[in-house]
Amino acid sequence: MWQAMQKASLDTRARVNYVPVTGEQSVANARPFFNTLMQRQCGVVLAVGGPQVEVTEAGAARHPNIRFVVVDGSSDAANVVVAKSGEGLEETVVDAIQQVVKGR
């Protein structure tokens, strides 16, 4: 995921950050990290891991102007792209970032 974000950054000059959830991997612990990203007004937020994906899918509806990519999630929200882990993941991440930067 991080390599895909770096590739998209090189292609678009978009600034990317990696913000891992530290400590216990739980929904309660992931939520403050999600909220921090919303306060930063990120254009794209990518979530990997069960708790991170759960928090992101739940919060996406409250932030319709942000595009979200969740790995192995199940959301059907218009601003959420569900990417499957494995082959094709890098392309999905790069495409999502490029679309936001190019205003699509």
Image (spheres, rainbow, N blue to C red):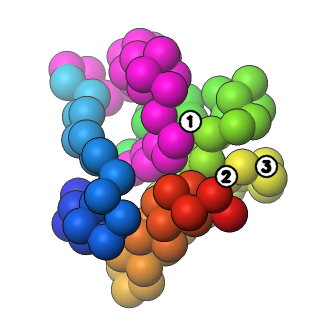
Is 74 on the left or on the right of 4, as rendered? right
Residue 21 inside the magenta-drawn segment: no
Q: Secondary structure at mark 1?
A: helix
Under mark 2, the amino acid is Val
Q: Secondary structure at mark 2?
A: strand
**Circle 1 crowding by C-alpha within 10 Å: few under 14, some 14–19, many from 20:** many
Q: Which residues are magenta?
A: 23-48
Q: Tell me how far mark 1 sits from mark 2, CA to CA.
A: 9 Å
Which amino acid, by three-letter code, is at mark 1? Thr
Read off the residue under disc 2. 80
Give the residue displayed 44% in from the left and 48% down from the top: 46
Contact, mark 3 vs mark 2 (Cβ under 8 Å): yes
Residue 88 percent across, percent down from the top left = 43, 84
Residue at mark 3: 77
Q: 10 Å neighbourhood of mark 2: few (<14), some, or many (≥20)?
A: many
The answer to whether mark 1 and mark 2 are in CB contact below 8 A is yes
In the image shown, does 88 or 39 lie closer to the viewer? 39
* Quadrant where the image shows the C terminus: bottom right
Residue under the image location 25 percent in, 34 percent down: 19
Residue occupied by mark 1? 56
- Nearest the eye: 55 or 4: 4
- Residue neighbourhood size for the residue with mark 3, other residues' Cα within 10 Å, grouped as few (<14), some (14–19), many (≥20): some
Q: Is 38 a magenta residue?
A: yes
